[in-house]
């Protein structure tokens, strides 16, 4: 798969995709938005996106208070990022039938968050484990398409992370 | 995302009591291994959120991956609650507990 993200000289992030990839991202963003706006009570994906802060059962009061403080903000943050991604999906005609777009620093953070959330949601549904190789799934597997989407998301996010990491100074600022 | 606000204690006793306990036993933030998050993404998040060097962020990521978990931050209950929320916002599986 050719590179999807690259850093332009003016500092913006260039996105280049096949139109089919843009359509797939739009569809996934819609499904994730639906899931966040209408959470089912007992959902493994919800538990993975919004874990507990305290494992200790004697901290139940603190856990409840913490959830009250942060849960809605965490939901809103994810929904906002989804809106940003949908609004900045590439539309300009580029080379070889691809479409192009440019992202600001804030927008690229939203893209990174959505790609990660989409992989967490899909990975949880698929029951991904440390040993799974999404590229080795049997074409007869009923989840074959979902595994391929997961592998594609992984490649996409990996590409984006490489570009973003290249812009982070190695020294840190503790 | 906004951070939790500062809670004003109802009584002086609550203020003093909490303060002493929190100082004696610090809290730690733990990140747990999960099969989805990419190694480089975890390094990026540790650098972004905590300002760690690439070397320290990478060492913590490796510890999470190989040992199943790692302490990535510590401090007061309030600070750790904010750190956990920021990690959750980035999709990392983080919890907090007393540093016993």
Image (cartoon, coloured by chain):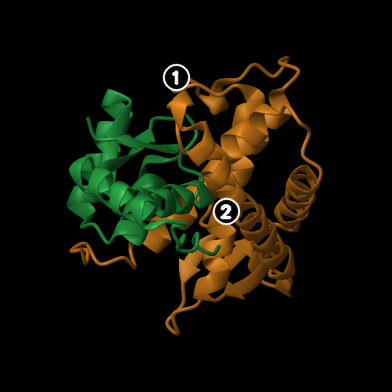
Total number of numbered discs in the rendering? 2
| SS at circle 2 | helix
Chain in green, by letter, is: B
Q: Tell me: residue B34, above or below residue B73.
A: above
The residue lying toward the viewer, choosing from B94 and B59, is B94
- The residue where tag 1 is placed is A131
Q: CA distance from mark 1 to mark 2?
A: 36 Å
Asked where in the image residue A172 lies, by quadrant, the reply is bottom left
Q: Residue at x 50, y 77 (%)?
A: A12
Which mark, by number, is residue A69?
Answer: 2
Q: Which residue is drawn at the image coordinates 43% and 27% (left, top)?
A: A56
Is the C-beta separation of discs 1 and 2 under 8 Å? no
Helix, strand or loop at mark 1: loop
Indicate the position of residue B74 as horizontal and vertical percent values: 26, 47
- Identify the residue shown where x is 42% and y is 82%: A9
Pick the residue in front: A61 or A49.
Answer: A61
Examine the rendering and report whether any part of residue A36 can be seen.
yes
Image-based side of A64 in relation to A140, left or right: left
Q: Position of residue A148 (x, y in %)?
A: 65, 33
Location of residue A98 in the rendering, given as x and y in whole percent from the top left corner: 68, 63
For residue A84, what is the image quadrant?
Answer: bottom right
Which tint is chain A?
orange
Asked whether the residues under marks 1 and 2 belong to the same chain, the reply is yes
Quadrant where the C terminus of chain A lies?
Answer: bottom left
Question: Mark 1, mark 2: which one is toward the viewer?
Answer: 2
Q: Is residue A1 visible in the rendered structure shown here?
A: no
Q: Residue furthest bottom?
A: A10
Chain bearing mark 1: A
Q: Is residue A55 above or below residue A4?
A: above
- Left or right placement of residue A129 versus residue B80 in this view: right
Chain assignment, label 2? A
């Amino acid at each position: 798969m050719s590179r999807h993200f690259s850093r332009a000289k003016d500092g913006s992030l260039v996105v280049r995709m096949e139109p089919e990839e843009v359509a797939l991202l739009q569809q996934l963003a819609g499904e994730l938005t639906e899931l966040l706006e209408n959470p089912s009570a007992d959902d493994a994906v919800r538990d993975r996106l919004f874990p507990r802060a305290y494992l200790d059962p004697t901290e139940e009061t603190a856990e409840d208070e913490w959830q009250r403080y942060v849960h809605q903000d965490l939901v809103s943050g994810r929904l906002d990022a989804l809106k940003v991604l949908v609004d900045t999906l590439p539309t300009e005609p580029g080379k070889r039938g691809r479409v192009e777009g440019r992202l600001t620093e804030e927008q690229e953070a939203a893209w990174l968050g959505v790609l990660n959330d989409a992989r967490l949601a899909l990975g949880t549904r698929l029951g991904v484990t440390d040993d799974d190789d999404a590229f080795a799934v049997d074409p007869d597997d009923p989840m074959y398409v979902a595994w391929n989407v997961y592998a594609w998301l992984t490649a996409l996010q990996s590409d984006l992370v490489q570009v973003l990491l290249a812009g982070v100074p190695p020294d840190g600022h503790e | 995302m906004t951070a939790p606000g500062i809670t004003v204690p109802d009584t002086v006793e609550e203020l003093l009591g909490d303060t002493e306990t929190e100082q004696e036993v610090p809290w730690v933030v733990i990140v747990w291994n999960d099969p989805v998050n990419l190694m480089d993404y975890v390094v990026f998040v540790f650098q972004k959120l905590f300002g760690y060097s690439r070397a320290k962020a990478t060492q913590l990521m490796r510890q999470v991956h190989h040992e199943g978990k790692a302490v990535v931050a510590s401090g007061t209950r309030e600070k750790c609650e904010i750190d956990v929320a920021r990690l959750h916002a980035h999709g990392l599986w983080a919890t907090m507990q007393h540093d016993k």
